[in-house]
Amino acid sequence: MPWDVVAKSLFIVVVGVGVFAPVVTWVERKQSAVMQDRIGANRADLFGIRILGLLHPAADVIKLIFKEDVVPHGANRALHLTAPLIAAVAAIVSFAVIPYGGEYTVGGTTFSLVAADVDWGLLFIFAVGALAAYGTVIAGWASNNNWSLLGSLRATAQMISYEVTMGLSVVGVFMVFQTLRLPEMVHAQDATFRLLGFLEVFGWVDPLPAWSDWIRLPRWGVFLQPLAFVMFLAAIMAENKRPPFDVPEGDSEIVAGYHTEYSGMRFGLFFMAEFIEVVVIAGLMVTLFLGGWSVPWLSSERIVAGITPLFGGGFANLFCMLVHVTTWLVKVSALIWLQMALRWTLPRFRYDQVMDLCWKILLPLSIANIFVTGTILLLIEGTR
Amino acid sequence: MSAELFFFYVFAALAAGSALAMVSNLRNTVAAALSLVVTMVSLAGIYVLLRAHLVAAVQIMVYAGAVLVLFVFVVMLLNLREDVFPPARLRPFKLAGAALGAVGLAGFLAALAGHVPDMAAVPESFGGYREVGRALFTDYVLAFELVSLLLLAAIVGAVVLAKRRLEP
Amino acid sequence: MITVEHVLALSGLLFAIGALGALTRRNLIVILMCIELMLNAVNLAFVGFARAWGDLGGQVVVLMVIAVAAGSVAVGLGIVIALFRNRDSVNIEDVSLLKW
């Protein structure tokens, strides 16, 4: 048994499920309070200590575990009980391929901070995301409730549609970085490029003045594929069925959609899956578009090279790892905040608007993006 | 038994068992579709064992993720709960047909015996997206384009069929 | 070590199950699903032979089959929905006008 894999998987479960998911529920409450000019969740207390409402997630978990687990009359019992498991497992498993650090050599052993370094990492996430749809579909169908069925029908149509755009919108990113392997993709982003370099590449200004070498941007996906960034964020947020894309559970129309009939910890699993998915989305966006663990303008070679003469190679690598993981956490937190801010800013779309956005705006735009990216890449290749 | 073979047997048992469950489920169409999902996912597992990584990913994304969701969607849309479809009556000539099929299968297997190739040694990258993509867009590009035409026809056909009424 | 015989045996079994279902079931949706199962059985054989010969052609064919199957399901389910609107049934015994 490779123990490093076990350790990394444990890290993912502890950080992703144990730490992030409950904290994200707290962030969501606090964010909503900020947006609505309230003080927010601060009622739960332990012997009078409230610590900013951070006890609310704990109170939630205790409540959900001890609540009665109701299976409605006439429901398909086995499927009703399986559905939340599918949703939660799919959300957790996607974490496996997201790198939260690079490769480090300490004491002669090299290790990389990603649980499963598979060649087709991104396809794995898409495949697992495709299976996650079943959690929703089965939940709605097995509940023997019309609201649930309506919610699950809406969810099915929405998830199939947005899967298409989600896949197509990141094709440009593959083309730029020439890989599907997520750690490799982050390595490719751990560098900078000259902002005016294209003038030289196409021979419009040749040679460029020396000062242009100082105007550099990190070689991040968001700078190379800005349109893909926006489209992918929209598509993947729709996949997660959170507002403004929450028509499958639109409370004002169909009670609570596919999880109307769930209570106790089974509802808790859906709830948790949604928040883990928020973290997965943040991790994936960071990996694809924001350089993953890399520090902007400071490549890992330069960090290691700078520290090694002072404290030796092993310490330099450890320090670099610490910096990288911290950077990753900062970036992921920023994107989680972005999702929360979007969720509390935008009102829910109407169902036809959700579909129009997918098929009439995002799909043509993503295909155009692929076409333009390919053309530019070929032009650059032609000048070499 | 090697780990590969062990997992092959696990996935094979899952695939065959859920396929049987799908065919024999007479009451519940959604459950039948979900059994087929299990078959598809286990087949994807076998594809990984056979070093067809890209095909495995596409299998899950397209078959399990889109095609079968579509099935479940349609069953839910039509609201076919607890349908009663009488199983077909076993007439003698159907039995004869089954026997003929068995004879044909036996003949096919006999013809195949001794001609089955052994597993070739393949490079590490075999079946990855780079290799398959290269094959797809060089040797098989005509087939690829034809499939895209077929898909266009399918889209148009599906839209026309699903429209409520064609204006005369 | 998985051999081609293993793969072919499973493939044949799945194809037989699919054929049995397609011939005996009366629910149009289930028949479509059985056809998908048969296509998958063939795909499995293709992947097995691709691995055996070390030739990617088999895997490319599988990708084509998956694309074609997706198209056929889209049209097939469109037909099912149209049929259900007109006949209020998905039993193939109810659509036997063209049967001799």
Image (cartoon, coloured by chain):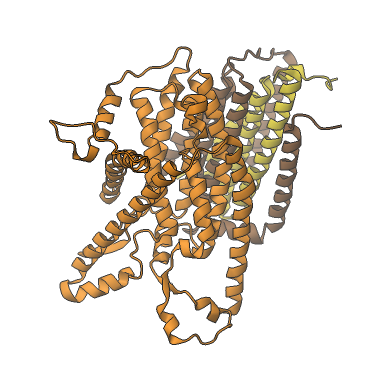
Chain colours: A orange, B brown, C yellow
Report the quarter where the C terminus of chain A lies.
bottom right
Q: Quadrant of residue A203?
A: bottom right
**Rendered residue at 30%/20% (across/down):** A67
Instruction: Locate residue A305: give its quadrant.
Output: bottom left
- Residue A16: image x %, image y %? 32, 44
Kindly give the residue lying farthest to the front in the view shown.
A37
* Residue C61, horizontal then vertical, whole percent: 64, 49
| Residue A322 in view here | yes
Residue A324 location in percent, x, y? Answer: 29, 61
Asked if residue B2 shows in the view, the reply is no
Which residue is pictured at 49% across the width and 21% down the height?
A142
Q: Nearer the viewer, residue A130 or A49?
A: A49
In the rendered view, does A301 fall on the left or right side of B21?
Answer: left
Q: Residue furthest left?
A: A47
B62 sits to left or right of B107: left
Nearest to the observer: residue A286 or residue C22: A286
Instruction: Please tell me which residue is depicted at 25% across the width and 27% down the height of the picture.
Output: A62
Query: Residue visible at 61% across and 64% down?
Result: A372
| Front residue (pair C39, B66) | B66
Residue C51 against residue B80 in the figure, above or below: below
Residue C97 drawn at (x, y percent): 83, 20
